[in-house]
Image: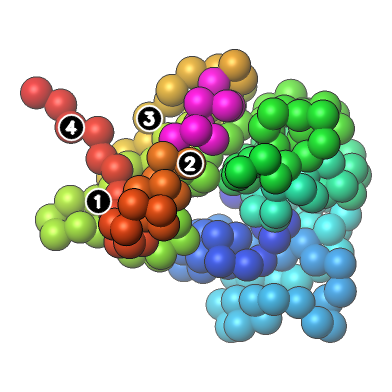
Amino acid sequence: MDIAIIGTGNVGGTLATKWAEKGYQIYLGVKDQANFKGENLLSNPNTKVTSIHEAVAAASVILIATPATAAIEVAKSLGDTTGKVIIDTGNCVMGRGPIGFSTTTDAILAHTETRDVVKCFNTTGFNNMRDTHYGTEKIDAFVAGTSELGTKIAHELALDADFGACYSIGGNDHFELMEKFAWFWINLAMFQGQGREIGFKLLKR
């Protein structure tokens, strides 16, 4: 599987590293190939830097890890996404997001060809993506989206990023719930003083 990463900051860079180490071909789609955040990612031979259009054209999966306010601009910059899966990691936090949309994923869906768009990797901090372990347990990932293909691929990639499991919480109508879940983590970590080293796991009995 070839993966285009749009947004090479903390989240995009961390997942790019995890997946490159698993043997996936990673294309970092950037505006300026001579000067971009995450140049150190190229130390892995499975990672290349290209233009955004070239990355999207080369990959079957596109991960968007850019600021929420840029969701529409980024979606428009992808070019033809027909037949591809998009995984959105964004969150509208404290009213900051794409104008006219309540979630970043809805904004992306409205400005791209593919219908295989899901939301995943948005409910925890990049530190937890870098190290998913809490003692003998691993935190879980969650995915929302109507696309069966997108959900299947997000599940596979979550396991390859070393999450304990990846649970579907519903279709496109649950994008907002996913963003509220992210806000729950942010609230606990940042505003309630729990710190970033906290994570969620689904327990069963």
Identity, as a three-letter code, of the amino acid under mark 2? Trp
Q: CA distance from mark 3 to mark 4?
A: 12 Å
The quarter of the picture where the C terminus appears is: top left
Identify the element where label 4 is drawn.
Answer: loop
Residue at the spot 88% in from the left edge and 54% down from the top edge:
53
Q: Residues within 10 Å of mark 1 (few under 14, many from 20)?
A: some
x and y percentages locating residue 129 in the rendered image = 41, 58
Give the residue number, with chain letter if any, for mark 2: 183
Measuring from the top left, give residue 88's x and y in whole percent: 63, 41
First in sequence: mark 3 or mark 1? 1
Report, in whole angstroms, how far the alpha carbon at label 4 lies from the one at label 2.
21 Å
Whichever of labels 3 and 2 marks the residue nearer the N terminus, that label is 3
Q: Which residue type does callout 4 highlight? A: Leu
User: Where does the image place residue 196, in percent across and percent down from the top left?
Assistant: 36, 61
Q: Are marks 3 and 1 in contact (CB under 8 Å)?
A: no
- Alpha carbon separation for disc pair 1 and 2: 21 Å
Q: Residue at x 65, y 49 (%)?
A: 63
Using the image, tell me which numbered label, if any, was put on residue 167. 3
For disc 4, the marked residue is 203
User: Disc 3 and disc 2: Cα gap in Å?
Assistant: 18 Å
Sequence order check, earlier mark of 4 and 2 = 2
Q: Is residue 188 left or right of residue 157?
A: left
Q: Amino acid at mark 1?
A: Lys
Q: Which residue is mark 1?
A: 138
Q: Secondary structure at mark 3?
A: strand
